[in-house]
Image (cartoon, rainbow, N blue to C red):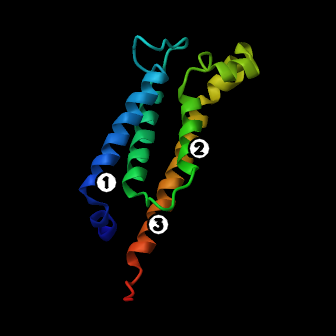
Amino acid sequence: MAAVAEGIGVKKLFIGVVVMGATFAALGTVAALWENPVFIRMIPADGWEISLLAILSVLSGVYVAIRRPFCSDNTLSAGGVVSFIGLACPICNKILLLAFGSELLMAYFDPMRVYVTAFGILVTAWAVIREWQQRMQIETLPETSV
């Protein structure tokens, strides 16, 4: 694990921290988890949204810091999208509103939002763990001389 941390470098750590902050600010603003002049939330945010957004942001930053540039996958993106659907206001999400209607969203989807967000975070964590394991395998391979 120390070899992986040493192999990351200061530049990748800095980029990971920037991605973490940008993810938190962008998704939180679009989901209107705090007052902003651009987006208005129709349903007040509960306390769990910001905590789960922070976890998602940290996982995204870690993934970017440890990511191998030649091998990326879409698992992190899928986890982020699913988490965002759970974080965002169901009434403000026009796609969900058109597909299901406001009554159905409020009756069935709104109580499940925390679970949808948690599932998205689990998918994101799985992507980070898998990337970490693959990076450790590459770091521990013996160097061959040509």
On the question of residue 46 being in view, the answer is no
Kindly report the distance in space between the C-alpha atoms of the residues bearing marks 3 and 2. Answer: 20 Å
Looking at the rendered structure, the kind of residue marked 3 is Gln
Kindly report the distance in space between the C-alpha atoms of the residues bearing marks 3 and 1. Answer: 18 Å
Q: Secondary structure at mark 2?
A: helix
Look at mark 3 in the image and give the residue it sits on. Answer: 133
Foreground residue among 98 and 12:
12
Horizontal arrangement in the rendering, residue 101 relative to residue 118 (left or right): right
Q: Quadrant of residue 68?
A: bottom left
Look at mark 2 in the image and give the residue it sits on. Answer: 78
Location of residue 102 in the rendering, given as x and y in whole percent from the top left corner: 70, 14
Looking at the rendered structure, the kind of residue marked 2 is Ala
Location of residue 33 in the rendering, given as x and y in whole percent from the top left corner: 44, 21
Task: Please tell me whether mark 1 or mark 2 is closer to you in this view.
Answer: 1
Precedes in sequence: disc 3 or disc 1: 1
Q: Residues within 10 Å of mark 2 (few under 14, many from 20)?
A: some
Foreground residue among 28 and 118:
28
Look at mark 1 in the image and give the residue it sits on. Answer: 12
Precedes in sequence: disc 3 or disc 2: 2
Q: Residues within 10 Å of mark 1 (few under 14, many from 20)?
A: some
Residue plotted at (37% across, 89% down) = 145
